[in-house]
Image (cartoon, grey):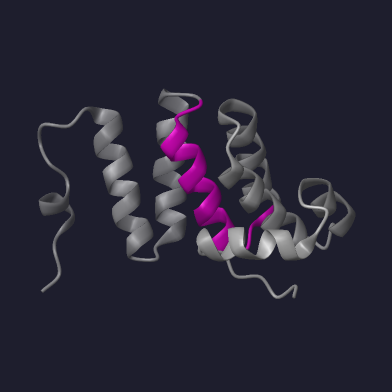
Amino acid sequence: MTSSFKEFVPLQKSPIEKLLISADFFSRQKKYDEAIEVYKSVLEKEIGNREALKKMGECLFFTKKFEAALRCFEAFEKLFQTEEAKVWSYACLVHLKRDADARKIFPDNKAAAPLLKESGIEIDYY
């Protein structure tokens, strides 16, 4: 039994929370382009929203829009200084065949492997 979108979005949430829930719903359905549009709406209303920035980057990555995904993760890293942002940025750079830039993040490819796996990122690099 599939749930409908209306059942998925609780009524007591703020407008931003409702948008984030709807974007997550689309993402879980692998409707990444729809999710990206909703995340863009969130970021228009709340610049630097942590969840929207990160998850929009992930959706862009999964749709192979690596340059745009990289920009999201670079902004995410600048705002929140997380290891996860570095891992996603690294994966984008590898897909973009920008190995020299990727090595600036993780000089040793083998050190990045467990972090990539932990984040659920698959790249054909090793």
* Residue 65 point in image, percent of width and height: 64, 57
**Is residue 26 positioned above or below 49 on the image?**
below
Labels in figure, total? 0
The secondary structure that most of the magenta stretch takes on is: helix
Q: Is residue 52 left or right of residue 100?
A: left
Residue 95 showing in the rendered view: no
**Is residue 41 positioned above or below 116 on the image?**
above
Q: Residue at x 66, y 65 (%)?
A: 113
Q: Residue at x 71, y 51 (%)?
A: 67
Q: Residue at x 43, y 41 (%)?
A: 39
Residue 74 showing in the rendered view: yes
Q: Quadrant of residue 94?
A: bottom right
Magenta stretch: give its range.
Answer: 48-66
In the displayed orientation, state which residue is furthest to the right. 100
* Residue 8 point in image, percent of width and height: 16, 52
8 in magenta? no
**Is residue 90 positioned above or below 16 on the image?**
below
Q: Is residue 27 left or right of residue 63?
A: left
* Residue 111 point in image, percent of width and height: 71, 59
In the displayed orientation, state which residue is furthest to the top. 46
* Residue 126 point in image, percent of width and height: 74, 75
- Of residue 117 and residue 54, the one placed in the foreground of this image is 117
Q: Quadrant of residue 83?
A: top right
Q: Which quadrant of the figure contains the N terminus? A: bottom left
59 in magenta? yes
Q: Quadrant of residue 18?
A: top left
Q: Residue at x 44, y 39 (%)?
A: 52
Q: Is residue 41 left or right of residue 111?
A: left
